[in-house]
Image (cartoon, helix red, strand yellow):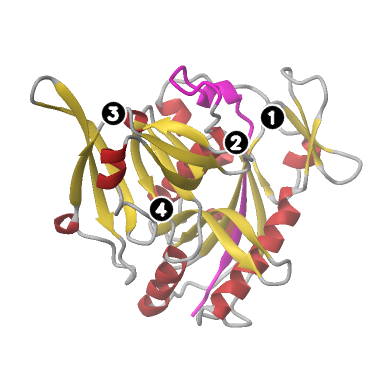
Amino acid sequence: MWVVILCGLILFKILRRIFRRDDAFPDIDSSDSDASFAVAARLEKLYGGKAFVGLRIPDADAGVRQHIDVVLVTKREVMVVAVRNFSGFVEIGGNENWVCTSDKKHRPQSHPDPVIELSKQVAVIESYLEQRGVPLPKGHVIELSKQVAVIESYLEQRGVPLPKDMPAYSISSQLEVVSFDKWRELKPEPRSGLSNWIKGAVGKSDMQDGFCEKLHFILGTSPMWDRLELRGDRNILGEFVEFKGNKNDMQALRNVKRSKVGRFIVQKPSMLGLGRSRLQVLYFPRDYRGKGASSSECKEIAVKPSTEVLFQQMNSKKAKKFKLSSIVSVTLSG
């Protein structure tokens, strides 16, 4: 049995305004999270399997949780993918960091080398899986450090013109870097079914079904960021804090909390007598077996549209309020 760790770096060189849309939250930048979910969706479409976004894997050595953008598990490989959303010209600086120069910012922005960061994340993933009882067999793990410089294809599908900024030759010429053109043409090898990132690197054996299921369960129940999905196809990773509203609505929402609920969906307002508008909140009890709650277990409550959700975006020091009427769904980490 071959177990492959494919380390991928997705470098986004898109303008932030592409992801920013004119809506009720002009000060909320969801481009980084949107990019991660877009990459995950395309990888699932290309190679099948299951993608996990926004993992927060405990790092025993550092005593902190390591944020990992995307992990894709297929029958033949495990891809650990880092997503970077850079705007402007990207090159390697004198201190080995990546330096991004943008027309919007007069000063170049320096970022830690994502390849080095990714190598550390892979070690954390391996250690974590071993602690959870699924060690990756020694001698059957091949670590390939890959970067991909891309603009995600879903932008094209929405008719958004793509910027012409490219990473410097010092980056794109590295063996680890895959150009935007190659990313657009990314597809599984027809014979082996493996991604062409790892062509010729491994054998052709699939992972055993039981082993793959264990990986799905472990990653699916591992710590991760909460996901706030807003109307307008925007996603924000962070931490759900609480609801804000009147006394009656707070009483109705008392059971919608992390320990009991894994996800809740907000439906369009319904009119209840005398023109009073109410939002329908459908919530699903948390399933600690990892099988997912069925629709028959869904429960429903009605609250005022003025009810708010307090949510703290990843890498932000302050939580912000979001009108419940602007929310599609919230997924809560266990």
Is residue 25 located in the magenta-colored stretch of the structure? yes
Q: Mark 1 or mark 2: which comes first in sequence?
A: 1
**Pointer 4 residue:** 332
**Pointer 1 residue:** 166
Which of the two discs, 4 and 3, sits closer to the camera? 3
Which quadrant: the C terminus? Answer: bottom left
- Judging depth in this view, the residue of 253 and 328 nearest the camera is 253
- Judging depth in this view, the residue of 250 and 94 nearest the camera is 250
Q: Mark 2 or mark 4: which comes first in sequence?
A: 2
Q: Residue at x 71, y 62 (%)?
A: 120
Question: Within the image, what quadrant is residue 269 found in?
Answer: top left
Query: Would you say 109 lies left or right of 312 here?
Result: right
Q: Mark 1 or mark 4: which comes first in sequence?
A: 1
Q: Mark 3 or mark 1: which comes first in sequence?
A: 1
Q: Please state which amino acid type lies under the numbered disc 2.
A: Phe
Q: Marks 2/4: CA distance? A: 34 Å
**Pointer 3 residue:** 305
Q: Residue at x 60, y 22 (%)?
A: 163
Image vertical order of residue 192 relative to residue 126, above or below: above
Which of the two discs, 2 and 4, sits closer to the camera? 4
Q: Marks 1/4: CA distance? A: 37 Å
